[in-house]
Amino acid sequence: MDALLTALAASLSWQSVLATFFGSLVGLIFGAIPGLTYSMALAMVLPITFTMGHTPAIAMLLGTYIGGMTGGAVSAILIGVPGTPSAAATVLDGEIMGKQGKASLAIGIATIAGCIGGILSLIVMLVSVDALARVAISFGPAEITALVVFGLSTICGLAGGSLVKGLIGGVIGLMLMNIGQDPIDGVPRFTFGSTAMLQGVDLLVAMIGLFAVPHVVTVFATYWRGKEMKIDPGHVRTELPSWRLLLAQRWNFLRSAAIGTVVGAIPGTGGPIAAFLAYDQAKRWSGHPETFGKGEVSGVVAPEASNHAVTGGAMIPLIGLGIPGDPATAIILGGLLIHGIQPGPLLFMEKPDVISSIYLLFVLSYIITALIQLFGVRLFVKALRVPPHLLALGILVMCVIGSFAIRNSLFDVGVMSLVGFLAYWLIKGGIPVTPILLGLVLGPTLEREARTALIMSEGSPTVFVESYTALLFWGLALLILLSQVVTMVRERNGKASKATT
Amino acid sequence: MSSIRSTATPLRLFGSAAAAALLIAVPLGTARAEFPDKTIEMTTLFGGPAQTTSQVLADLMSKNIGQPVITVSRPGGGGAIGYTYVQSAPADGYSIVFSSNSISTVYYQGNLPFNYTALAPIAHIGMEVPVLAVRADSGWKDLKSMQAAAKASGKKLRVGVSGLGTFTHLASAALFNRLGLQVVYIPYGEGRAPAELLGGRVDAALQWSSQFAPHVKAGTINVLCMTSKDKVDLAIETVTCDSAGATGLDLTIWRGIHAPKDTPPAAIARLEASIKQAVESAEFKKAGENLGFTPLFKSAKDFGKLVADNDKEIGELMTELGINKKK
């Protein structure tokens, strides 16, 4: 109790609140701009924390992390370009809601879903950090391979009209990620002897190309033909979600947060898988799956609740074992270490006040981030009053800056443009971009984990089916695939019988 | 050129005036202004604790050199991207790289068209000494008991390393060859060593001591030895592998600063002095303790010799392992 009170006093000091506010704001801005990520925001604020006391330092790092996760949804909804890969699933329904004039409602619900998802994950962390950390380390390369294949199976649900076109998209994504240095032996692949090509295709660079470039090209093309939509200023209302709307989503909140927390706790996975799995599940459990992809509120709630729950989930191995699961938590770990805080099992015994302040600051970050977002909504939606072709110009500039900034590499700007024009033609050909993104996100993990598993077993493929966890995920993936095939066959038969009668 | 000709007359006048002013100012400027008179950019190659160390160093250098020193991350290609960038940057002292043995490993892997001689050494900053860790419930308390148990079982040991061809792989190979043990190397990336060990998927792992520290204190992981020949202060008290049975083993990661090859000696000297002051400060020592890094300043000359010796050793080791593409 003493530890909690000391932590409470330290966490709610003006320095900590100010640090959280600053962190959240920086995170939100970095998160909202495609190409600037919360990992970059964290690396940027880290040196500022060197001279601070440890509580404000933790406050600033957590604020940045959480603000960055939340910011991703803003651009996903307003301009249809996810600010971070974790917000890619939010585009599916969020962008449509934005086009229907419900942008503020969508941002509002995304913010609240994120806040609830994050705090639910914290509660899970509070009660079961030991148990979940143990579950997390039981995931070896073979189990993660199975989980990733389960994640890939969501392509079925995302493919829309044609499963074949969805699969083509997924394979294009997987293929793109083969360029560059191979993750195991360091052998250059498809680099044609060029050092620049060793970098390969960066996920974020490709994501910007996939989502932003086709959007910009389409807007310019419509403008050229003189068919640009007139903006009706009254069309952009600021409307926040009602209690009734939120209450109706309670199961979606719980289910998505649970998926996010578990996926977040497993090192080497992360936000995008969690968001897509949650979206897919929300659609499957929904009474009206046909409304998904057409501006369905549940389609915004699920990915946002889930990717925010990842923040709490990722803290579990970080705090419980000192193991960072992704680049962002690795930077947070660096920030903790430099202040003499070594996360791990002993931290709970040696410095319970630090643990308590991490929990409190986590909640504080969510509250402050949500407040900034809800107040900011009025400002954000003003972006929609800008004529689309001017907005597209702004987006284009941001894309170039963003794709350069990720690795300070001009090569990446070229990759972004190339992937973008490829995506434009693919969309014209009816191939959806979301499965491509899923391939991009999951490809490197799939390859690294599957190959590591095979090295461990000295080449024997039975390693993939030796544990119950792996079998569970293989089973789930198979189930989704089968149910998709059954639905397709039924639809075809239905059409055929209609045609004959 | 045509664009300049087509500009309006007043602008052109202004342009030539400015050019004239520059012509006068430049020689004066170089005579007066001392290095550095603008921001120095330190390229970093990897994330994780090494990146944090570089940020602390840049921060301390900014305070004593009179200009900001900023870190810019250029990851990818096992370090090849960042080294290539700095090697082709102007040799004026404003582009430096936070380097390590990776310049040798990535060269011998065949992914870097030049080796360490294409860069000018500025200063040695410190070293990282990996340690060999095993699960506590294996019952192995020292190198000898692990060796005996592994030989008795007749099975290959599964040893976790950061990646094939990386430094931890080379150091493990040197260690286990000396012990005469059959080993499968599992590459799983930097931060996952404790998880893979505790999860029972590898029998031993060679990694930085700071990762294992909380688990050693909690009694779930035993650290058997460190790979340097001389004992250094680490987060965990342990003996050297050399004394524990792997006679002659001496492999550590060096970290330092390099610049493009033809950087003027005056700039190198100024940077060297700034780094010396930063590395020998109490703040850097403290950061080193917390991050599992042993600060140790060495002059440009000594550092250059160390890099050359180490490069030779790494080349030989990689030939022995059959992964040297430059032979």
Image (cartoon, coloured by chain):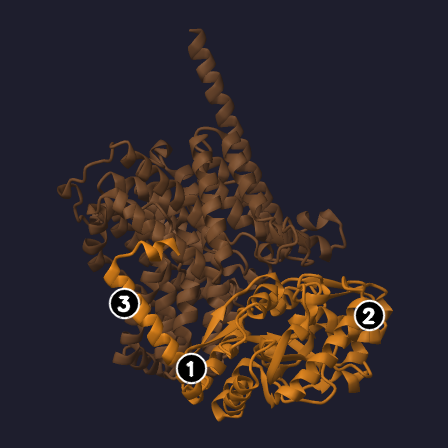
Chain colours: A brown, B orange
Q: Position of residue A256 (x, y in %)?
A: 40, 50
Residues behind callouts 1 and 3 on a single chain: yes
Comparing labels 2 and 3, the label whose residue is closer to the camera? 3
**Mark closer to the chain start, 2 or 3:** 3
The image quarter containing residue A311 is bottom left
Residues behind callouts 2 and 1 on a single chain: yes
User: Tag 3: residue type?
Assistant: Phe
**Tag count:** 3
Q: Nearer the viewer, residue B87 or A404?
A: B87
Q: Which residue is the site of mark 2? A: B150
Image point 47% across, 67% down: which residue?
A: A329
Q: Is residue B195 above or below residue A198?
A: below
Chain letter of disc 3?
Answer: B
**Mark closer to the chain start, 2 or 1:** 1
Number of other residues with Cα within 10 Å of mark 2, as a class: few under 14, some 14 to 19, many 20 or more = some
Q: Give the numbered dot on residue A225.
A: none
Q: Which residue is the site of mark 1? A: B27
Q: Which residue is the site of mark 3? A: B14
The image quarter containing residue B197 is bottom right
Number of other residues with Cα within 10 Å of mark 1, as a class: few under 14, some 14 to 19, many 20 or more = few
Q: Position of residue B217 (x, y in %)?
A: 59, 81
Image point 61% across, 89% down: which residue?
A: B299
SS category of the residue bearing label 1: helix
Q: Does the image show residue B2?
A: yes
**Mark closer to the chain start, 1 or 3:** 3
